[in-house]
Each structure stands twice: as C-alpha cells, then as structure tokens.
Image: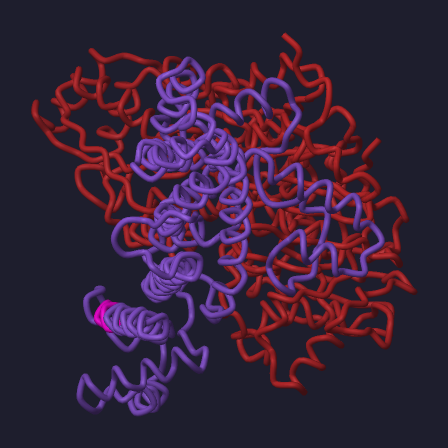
Chain colours: A red, B purple
Amino acid sequence: MLMGCSDADDTAGPLDGVIYCSEGDPISFNPQLDTSGTTSDASSHQIYDRLINFDPLSGQIVPGLASSWLVSKDGLTYTFQLRRGVKFHQTPYFSPNRTFNADDVIFSIDRWRLPDHPYHEVSGGQYPYFSSLGLSNVIADVKRINGYRVELTLKQPDSSFLANLATDFAAILSAEYAQQLTQAEQQNRIDMFPIGTGPFKFEKYKKARFIRYLKHDNYWQHDLAVERLIFDITPSSSQRLAKLMTGECDAIAFPAHTELDTIRERADLKLDEKPGLNVGFWAFNTSKPPFDNPKVRRALAMAIDKNTLIEGIYLGSAVNAKGLLPESSWAYQADLNDVNYNPVMARQLLLESGIEDGFTMNIWAMPVERAYNPNARKMAELMQNYLNQVGIQVNIISYEWTAFRERLKDGLHDSVLIGWSADNGDPDNFYRPLLTCSAIESGTNRAMWCSPEYDALIDQALTYTEIEQRNHYYRLANKLIADEVPLVPIAHAYRYRAHRQNLEGLLINPFGAIRFGDVQKQ
Amino acid sequence: MMLAHVIRKFNLLILTLLVLSILSFMLVYLFPGDPLVNLTGLEDIDQETYQRLTVLHGFDKSYFHQYWYYIRGLFDGEWGLSFSSGLPLANEIAQTLPASIELSAYALILSLLIGVPLGFVAGFQHHKTTDYGLLTASVVAYSMPIFWLSLILILVFSLQLGWLPLSGRISLLFDIPHHTGFILIDIFFSDLSYKGAAAKSAFYHLIMPTASLTIVTAAIIFRLTRRSVIEVMSSTYVQAAYTRGLSGFQVVMRHGVRNALVPIIPLFGMQFAVLLTNAMIVEVVFSWPGIGSWLIQAINQRDYPAIRAGMLAVSTLVIMLTVATDLLAKLINPAQMGTAHAES
C-alpha cells in the first residue's frame, strides 16, 4: 500500500508555522484561573513565562524571568533577582512602554493572593490551583526591593514553595497592561486578550475552531520560535489522528490508546511516550456510611482485580499503582504493600462489618478521557462484575463533566473513579490536594477524607528541605493511607503525544503543559 | 401580464417571510427558559438590565408589540447574542452563511455543467446503451447517502493516498481577512504576499466537499433533464418538425433545448434547498465552517438564540432563491402556462 508519501496539506507552501490539534476550548488565556490542562496548554508556555521553570528533562528548577534567587536560612524569605530588558508582547491592542520589572511580579502574585486586589474578582475571582494548596495563606508579603529585585516572605517554611512558583499556573502578567485596561475600564479583557513575555503572542481565538499565535520577535530567551503557531481545536481523537496523517496537524493531543499502534506503524509519524506524573484511583466517600468504615473500604479494595483493569482499560500503557506517587518521583516508596485481589476475604470482611448480600452502592465514572483513566465508564462496568461476585449491586453514574465535578464537590457520590495529574515534581502536589482536610473545601479531595494526623504529617514534611527527612514523613503518610484506604490507587498511566517526523523539539513535559517555544519544523 | 406575475410572486414571498418570522418569534416562547433570555441571548443579567430589556423589547406590552419590536430588531441587524460564544448572531451568521453558499454554489454550477449535458445525451439516446449506462450511474450516485460518500472520499483521497486535506476551508496557517466571506474572492482581493499559495490551499480544501455534493446533485439534475428531454422529443411539434424535413441537429437546437429546459428551471431552483441541506451534512463531515456545522453545534449546545436566528436565515435564503429562480424561468419563457409552443 502506498501511504503517506506525500502530504495532503503541503499547500501551505511559503508559510512557516506549526499546527497543533488540541482537544478542546480553553476557558481563558490565563492559567492562574483554571487547573484544566486545556487552558494551560493554550497559555502557560506559549504566552507567558514564570519566575522559575522546571527543566522538562531533569525536573530541576531552572531560572526563568528570575535570573537567580536566594532562600534565607530560616526558609521564610525568598529573594528573586529579575532579568533586565525582557520585552512584553507588542500587539494591536497593547504597546508596552517599558520592559519587565518587579511591578509585574507583584501584580501577578497579588492578583490571586489578595482578595481586595482590584483585579482579584475580574474573571470570577477563582484561583483553584493556589487555593487548593492554600498558598495565599502561606505568603505573608511580596515586596519590591528595587526595580529588579523582589522579596517574598512566608508565614511558615514551605519546601515545596519554589516548585509551586515553577508550575504552569504561576504566570507573570503585565502590570502596565492591567493599568491601561483599568483606565479604559476594560478589565475583563485581561484574560481573553492576554499579554505576556512568552515566545508567542496571542492573535486570534475562535471558539471551537482555532487559536492563532504569532512569534514574539523580541523574546528574551531565544529567536527559535516559528512564525506562526496554531491550535486547531478538534475534540474527536480519531479526527485528530486523521488530520495528523494528512499533515493538516503537525502534532496532536491525547492519541487514543486504541490508535497507538496505527501511529507506530507509520514512518512519517512519531509517537512519544513517557511515564506520567499521575495517578488514577477509586475514591470512597468517607463521609457517608458504610464507607466511613475502613474495614468496608479495605474489603471493597480486595474485591477488585487491578491487573485486569489495567490490561483492559489502559491496554498495557500504565503501571499498577501501589500508592499515590509514581516511580519517577523521588519520594516513591518501592517496598509499599499492595492490596491483593481476594474476593473470599473481601466477602468475609463485608459480612463482619454488617454488609449483607444485595447491598447497593454507586460508582461515579467521569465522562471524559484523561491520561490517568482513558475510559472510566468501562472500568466501572468491569468493577461492577467484580463487586457482584462479593454480593454488591453497583449502579454506574455519570454526568456532564462540569456538573459531575460540582456534584462530587458536594459529596453526593458513594465512590468515584477519577485521578490526578501533578503540576510539579514535588510529592506534596499529590499528598496535599488529594487527601488533606482543606482540599475538601477546594474540591480536590474526592474521598472527603479528613484526618488531622495525616494533615500534620504532610505539613511537617514541608518544614524540612532534606529529602531523607521529608521521606520519613511521607512514609508515615503512606502507611496511614494503606491502613485507612480512603482511596484505592489503580494505575500510573503513560503519557503519549504524536507528531510528524519533521517536527523537532516537542518534548512531553511531565510537569504540565505543552511547550512550543523551541519547536522546529524541518 | 409579466408584472402581475412578479407582483403575485412578491406577495407570496412577503407572506411566507411573514409566517417564518412569526414562527421564529414563537420559538422564543416555545424554547425552555425565560423568553427574554432566549430572545436576547443575554444570560445572568441583573434586575436593572432585565427591566431595561423588558421595555426595550416590548415585553411589558402585548405579543403584537413584542413581535413588532422583534421585526424591527431583525431589520436593524439586532438578532441577539449566541449563548455559547456571546457574540452577536448577525455577525456569526454573516461569517458562516457565505461559506455554505460558496460551497453550494460551486456544487450547483458543477452539477449543472455535468448533469444538463449528460441529461440531453441520455434523452436523445433514449433506450440505447448510453442512456442505460448513464441512468444506472445516476441511480448509484443518487442512492448513496451523502455522509457515507464523503467518508469514502476521505478514506481514499486523504487517508490512503494522502492527496487532499480533510477538514476546513484553507490551511489554518493562512489568515485571510474576512470581507465577503467567499474565500476565493477574499483571497483574490486581499493584498497578501502569499495569494497564490492561499488560493491553492483553498482550492485543495474545496475539492472533496464540492465533489460529494456534486455527485449527488448532478445525478438529480441529470434525471430531471433526461425526463424532460424525452418528453419534448416525443411531443407532436417535434415530430412535426422532423416531418417538415429539418435535420436532427436543427430540431434539437430549435425545439429541443429550450423547450426541455424551460419547465425544469424552477425545479433546479428547488434543488438548491436540497443542496443546502446536503451541504450542511457535508460541512459536518469536512469540518467546513459553514452555517450547517454552526447550527448543529448550536443544537448540541442548546444555544436557543442561535438555533432561532440560524433557521430563520437559512429558510429565508431558500425561499428567496426559490422565488428568484421561478421569476427567472418566467423571464425565459413568459407563456409558461399550458403546452410549450413551437418556434417555426
């Protein structure tokens, strides 16, 4: 068969540009406002920079807009030395009169930190990433030392603080642009017509169709970026693959697991895979009887065969999860004990806890595909079978995604199949949002599990910077999770991205959003 | 006589549009939710704005008043806002409708260029092999569901051969300024440095959607023409012309072509309605950013103002075109009533 010898869409001819087929519409172009990957993909690394960055290869924190930084001995004061001469985007709607300086840093942090900041309530006033970590309460003050030096003071030491500043969500906005918008009384434009210092500037967005970016000619870091970057919004994964095959897209988001072999077989396409910093799990609503009983939760965990789930749902593209953390994390505990599949024991434990045959519970299955769980509905159906064998009737429940998350936050579920993708390499990014008491309020603790003992361990771990000491507390936390079983970790999935052979420099960023800054097309 | 006919058609047009506008106004009430919200497309409005809008749209008065304000708004281009994008519907439709018209127009022109001559060939060769061959081909083309045909084209020409792109109107790398909404015209009158490349890309993107529409539509036009030609050729005046000693060619040119075409021109006009419906399906398959994919998206997202305005726009267009082709047919042949007359 003659396949892929020519590109259907080499008609673009003289135009230099990269087209990325993305999976959906961003909510805005400000990553501070949303934790969804779609929003940060479209903004974080294209339009903005951060003070510091993760190196996608080593996971080390490297300088960004801050050329260097200093942490005081007591771990309370962080001083950032800022780069000079960094230019903001020049667009038809904004012409910068000055380069980047301390005011922009202060504006960007104070916007989410201070509820009375003039821009706090613009675009809804929700900053889910920062509020799930309680960061507004950690920072005591952000001070300008001089035009190119900023000092952040914390209330208590927090060894994950730098990692949080390097996440996709800690974008640096332009204070001058905000000021101009205030004068024109058009504050709400700030997140839909964004201005940043990143390698691309925003040009045009048409909902459900495309986002266009142009090269930022005065990008401070390099001059490598392609002239045009386009996000072709294509929600169907088979359509994305088809466009990749014809060359209408240069790279695509989330290839379906069933399509991976098709991509591998073609010489003109390339499939990148990498173990992801994520975990898919089955969380019990511990605020609801009988799921408030650890014995019942353990019994349910024993009733399902995780290996079959992983084979059937992830098609071998995931590893069994014993705890919250994947193997690539430095705090991964290799000797952690897994709960084994044992339906006989499960039944006995259930009977001991007073759960009779014919007990009915519901499993909520999320309606969207995510790397950590590509098909929650099918997984729920498999689990329905397993639980049937120990005498439990299961109803599978699903709503449209936004409604689903709202109802979960209200705790209307018995149990849910969902997961978590980390935003930075720090273990705290798993332990804190998934199971601490304060995360119930911000809507990331799906188990509704609140244990002061666990919270204390997680907080204590942050007061140390040495890895061994932090590990000690995380091991204790792991033990607590294993004893209490607020959730059953199921799998750490690989992350995939497919692109055409002629595209170079597109790395899978384990710490979040896609980066096109140094992508080249041959 | 002619004037009377034009006036009569015009009255019919006005009356139909009136009924359509009433229907679309009724949708405001028939769709779930607050009628004022369905009308304006403004959700989450505060009490003060709500009061202002109530007065502005006559919602404090009778239905008749509301309808009157609604019509006035339609003429002023105030069609309300889309729920999903928050943009004025008039603009959205002005952007998407030309894309559909463009696609349909090319397909119609091609279908006429293919269907009419082939219809004549088959008609003149009635009961001969050519006729049967063409008729069989037309039945096949006519019976294929258009979305299936489109998918087959994609499978072959995009995925297997890799010759043609499968989505959109043009490679997204090109940013063509929107003036008329007809992409080839917009490219032609733009001052871009890469006009040639852009036109080539737009042309490549046009091939498959146009082809699938043309295959189905040309088959219908072929069948209409063929039937008409057969009827004309077996009529008494054609037989008479032969007996008067005119050659076959003379008969066809003097009596055949015109008399066969006149009765079916209004039918071509009606095909445009079918064509536009087909175009909407094709648009979805090829992600063509026209009114069809736009409307389907609006229906999926329960964007009531968009559904209402989109339906009104499409049906208005179809009616105007039907009436226009009808008048055109009248111009060609003022004495359309009764049997067609021979020219001698």
Using the image, determine if residue B286 lies above or below residue A194.
above
Magenta stretch: dominant SS? helix
Q: Can see residue B289?
A: yes
| Front-lying residue, B189 or A61 | B189
Residue located at (42% from left, 13% from top): B129
| Residue A50 coordinates in the image, percent (x, y) | 74, 55
Using the image, determine if residue A207 lies above or below residue A85.
above
Q: Is residue A77 left or right of residue A296?
A: right
Q: Quadrant of residue B139?
A: top left
| Residue B341 coordinates in the image, percent (x, y) | 34, 50
| Residue A516 coordinates in the image, percent (x, y) | 74, 43
Query: Looking at the rendering, in which quadrant would you find the C terminus of chain A?
Result: top right
| Residue A277 coordinates in the image, percent (x, y) | 58, 33
Using the image, determine if residue A328 lies above or below residue A225.
above
Residue located at (40% from left, 57% from top): B333
Q: Is residue B132 left or right of residue A517?
A: left
Magenta-colored stretch includes residue B57 = no
Residue at the top extreme of this rendering: A1
Q: How many marks?
A: 0
| Front-lying residue, A111 or B292 | B292
Using the image, determine if residue B276 lies above or below residue B86.
above
Q: Can see residue A279?
A: no
Residue located at (36% from left, 70% from top): B2
| Front-lying residue, A28 or B79 | B79
Query: Looking at the rendering, in which quadrant would you find the N terminus of chain A?
Result: top right
Q: Quadrant of residue A189?
A: bottom right
Q: Which residues are magenta?
A: B22-27
Q: Is residue B107 left or right of residue B337?
A: right
